[in-house]
Image: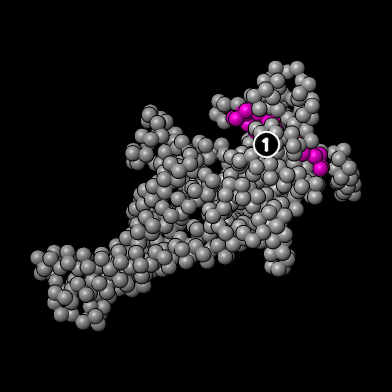
Amino acid sequence: MQSMDTIDQIAVTRETAEENGSAPVVAVEDLHKSYGSQKVLNGISLTVTRGETLAVLGRSGTGKSVLLRLIIGLEKPDSGSVRIHGQDITGMPLDEIGDIRKKMGFLFQQGALYDSLTIEQNVAFPLRHHKKTMSKSDQDERVSALLAEVGMAGQSEKMPSDISGGMRKRVGLARALVLEPDILLLDEPTAGLDPISAAEIDELVLKLQAEHHMASIVVTHDLHSAKTIADRLALLNEGNVVIVGSFQDLQESDIEFVGEFLRHS
Amino acid sequence: MIDRKLSTVASMAPPPVGLWILFESSGVNSAKDVLNEFFEWFGDLGIFFWRVVRAAASPPFEFRELFRQLDEIGSKSLPLVALAGGAIGVVLSLQSRQSLTRFGAKSLLPAAIVFSIIHEIGPIITALVVAGRVGAGIGAELASMKVTEQVDAIEASAVNPYRLLAAPRILACILMLPLLTLAADLCGLVMGWVAQALVEPLSLHQFITSGFKGTGFTDFLPPTFKTAVFGLIIGLIACFQGMRTEGGAAGVGRAATSSVVLSSLLLIMADVVLVKIIIIFFP
C-alpha cells in the first residue's frame, strides 16, 4: 500500500507532467459502447494533453458525440477506461464524478441553454452552484467579462428563445468556461451555422484556447473547422479510430476511407 | 447520472397493465413482453425514487427551487382546486338531498355532506385535479428539458439533476396536497351549505353544528394527510416520466399524457389501500 506522501508525490509529478504536456489530461483506452445490438464504439483509444486541441471527425452516427458523453461521464461505457487527470471516471458514483466535471466545460450541439433563465443566469448557473464563497458582485463581474469575451455583451437580459443559433453557441461556450476548466469538450460547435458565423465560432475557440490553454476535444464533421482549430485530427469509422495525426498526415495517408472522407468534405 | 441505457429501455417501456392505448404505440405484442415491461417500469421507478431520496437527503439543499415549486404547485393550483371542491359540494348537496328525503333522513344531510367531503371526496378530487394540472406540467417541462439536453447540461455542470429538478417538485407536491385538500374541503362545505340554504333556509351555524356532530380529529386528520401520499405519487410519476423521455416533441407529448394517466390511476389504487389502513388504525 502506498503512503500518503507517495500518493501526493505521484499527484505532483503528474501535475508537472501535465503542465509541460508530457502526460495526457484526457486518456481514453479501449472504449466500447453499444446500444442494444448496435455497436457504436469498438475499442477507441485517444489521448489529449494540456493546451492541445484534438478534433474528432467522422460520418454521422459513428459515435463522435457518444465519445464526448462518455468522457464527461453522462454515459457509462460497456468496457474500457476514461482517465481524467489520471483518474478513471468510468466506475465513479455521481457525487464523486461531480468534482471531476467542475474541471470540464461542455458545449452542447444546440447550446442546451436553460430556457427559463436569462443569458446572464445561464452563464452564472455553474458559479451559483459551485462558487458559493464568491461574492455576488464578483460572480456578476466574471459573467459579464465572459459574455464580452464571446461577443455577447449587452445581451445578458435576453432569453435563449430570443437569440440566434450562433449566439446560443457563444453563450453555451461562455457557460462552459465560467468555472475555468482544464478540459473543454465541444460537440459540433459549427453545425447548423452559416459560413460566417461558423468562422466566427472557430476564431472564438482559437482565441479562448490561446488564452485559457486548455485540453480541448472538438467533435465535428466540418473538416475546414477542424483544420482551423485543431492540432491533431482523429478520424472515426464504424466505431474505430482510422487515423490520428495532423491534417497533413491525413492528406498523405493511403487509407482508402481517409481519402474518401477528404474528397467529400 | 441519467442512465442512458436505463432510459433507452424505459422509453420503450409501456406504462402498467390497463393502459392499452399506450401499449399499442410501443409495438409490444406478446403477454410475456407486456409482463416484462410492466416489471421493468416498476424497477426503473424504484431506482429513480432511490436516487431522488439520496439526492434530497444530502446537501446542498435547493431551498430556492423548493419555494418556487411550492408557489407553482400550491398557489397556482388553488383556484382550480377551490372551484372543483365548491362544485362537488353543490352536486353532493343536490344529489344527497333527493336520496335522503326518499328515506326520511333529510336531517342527516349536513352530516352526509361533511363526512363525504372530508373523508373521501375532498382528498380524491384535489388529488385528481392536481394530477391533471401539475402532473402534466411537470411531465412536459422535464421532458422538454430532457430532449433539448438541458438535463444533460445540468449534469455536465456538476449539478445533480435529481437534487435540482426532481426532489423540490416531489417535495412540493407532498407538502401542498394536504393544504390544497383543506381548501377544497372548505369550499365544498361552504358551497354544500349554500346549495342547501337556497332550497330550505338553514344558517351556516346550524349546518356546521349538525354536520360536525360526533366528528373528531380522527375523522379529519388521516384523510387529509393521506393526500401527502397522493402528492408523492403525482410528483414522482411526473418527474420519472419527464426525465426519461426521448424522441423530441412526440416524446414530450407522451410524457405529459402518461404523467397524468399513470399518476391518476396509481393514486386511485393507493386510495383503496390507504382507506383500508385508516379504517384499521382509526376505526
Q: Which residues are magenta?
A: A40-64
Residue B79 visible in the shown view: yes
- Amino acid carrying label 1: it is Val
> Is B212 drawn above or below residue B24 in the view shown?
below
Residue A132 visible in the shown view: no
> Is A81 drawn above or below residue B48 in the view shown?
above
**Residue B272 relative to residue A12: left or right:** left
Quarter placement of the C terminus of chain B? bottom left
* Residue at 48% from the left image edge and 39% from the top image edge: B247
Q: How is the image coloured?
A: one colour
Few, some or many residues within 10 Å of mark 1 (<14, 14–19, 20+) = many
Residue B162 covered by magenta stretch = no
Count of picture labels: 1
Residue pointed to by mark 1 = A219
Q: Residue B207, image x and y in percent?
A: 23, 78
* Residue at 55% from the left image edge and 57% from the top image edge: A159
* Residue at 63% from the left image edge and 36% from the top image edge: A65
Q: Main secondary structure of the magenta part?
A: strand
